[in-house]
Amino acid sequence: MLVRRAVINALVEPFITASCRVIGILPDFLALPYTPGHWSLAADGQQIIVRTGICRGFTIEIDAFDTVASKFYAGG
């Protein structure tokens, strides 16, 4: 996963200003429960967050989910 440094800095800056120490930033999909052999999903109306493994997942726009998920799940 790639995120621009400016985005990370913008996320961390309020914590630094409040004298909080940031020790890590994790991808959103790791907040979903992990169950071996199953996917966990969360949708917000615009995107779907998917956890596919212990340290794997992705976030995608709802309109693209069917196409991507079918290829991912089929191994294609």
Image (cartoon, helix red, strand yellow):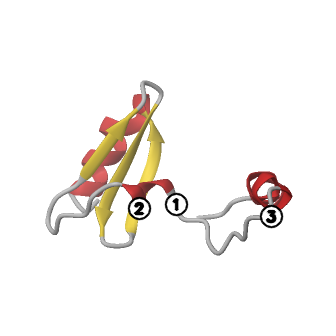
SS under mark 1: loop
Q: Are marks 2 and 3 in contact (CB under 8 Å)?
A: no
| Earlier residue among tags 2 and 3 | 3
- Which residue is under mark 3? 19
Instruction: State the image coordinates of residue 4 (x, y, percent, origin top left).
Output: 77, 59
Q: Residue furthest top?
A: 45
What residue do we see at 16% from left, 59% from top?
Answer: 38
- Left or right, 12 with respect to 54, comes to right
Q: For the C terminus, give its image quadrant.
A: bottom left
What residue do we see at 69% from left, 59% from top?
Answer: 3
**Above or below, 61 relative to 15:** above
- Which residue is under mark 2? 30
Instruction: State the image coordinates of residue 26 (x, y, percent, origin top left).
Output: 54, 65
| Circle 1 crowding by C-alpha within 10 Å: few under 14, some 14–19, many from 20 | few
Q: Tell me the CA gap for discs 3 and 1.
A: 23 Å
Tell me which amino acid carries mark 3. Answer: Ser
| Earlier residue among tags 3 and 1 | 3
* Nearer-the-camera pick, 18 or 44: 18
Q: Tell me the CA gap for discs 1 and 2.
A: 6 Å
- Which residue is under mark 1? 27
SS under mark 3: loop
Tell me which amino acid carries mark 2. Answer: Leu
Instruction: State the image coordinates of residue 39 (x, y, percent, origin top left).
Output: 22, 55
Q: Quadrant of residue 47?
A: top left
What residue do we see at 41% from left, 61% from top?
Answer: 30
Q: For the N terminus, give its image quadrant.
A: bottom right
Q: Are marks 1 and 2 in contact (CB under 8 Å)?
A: yes
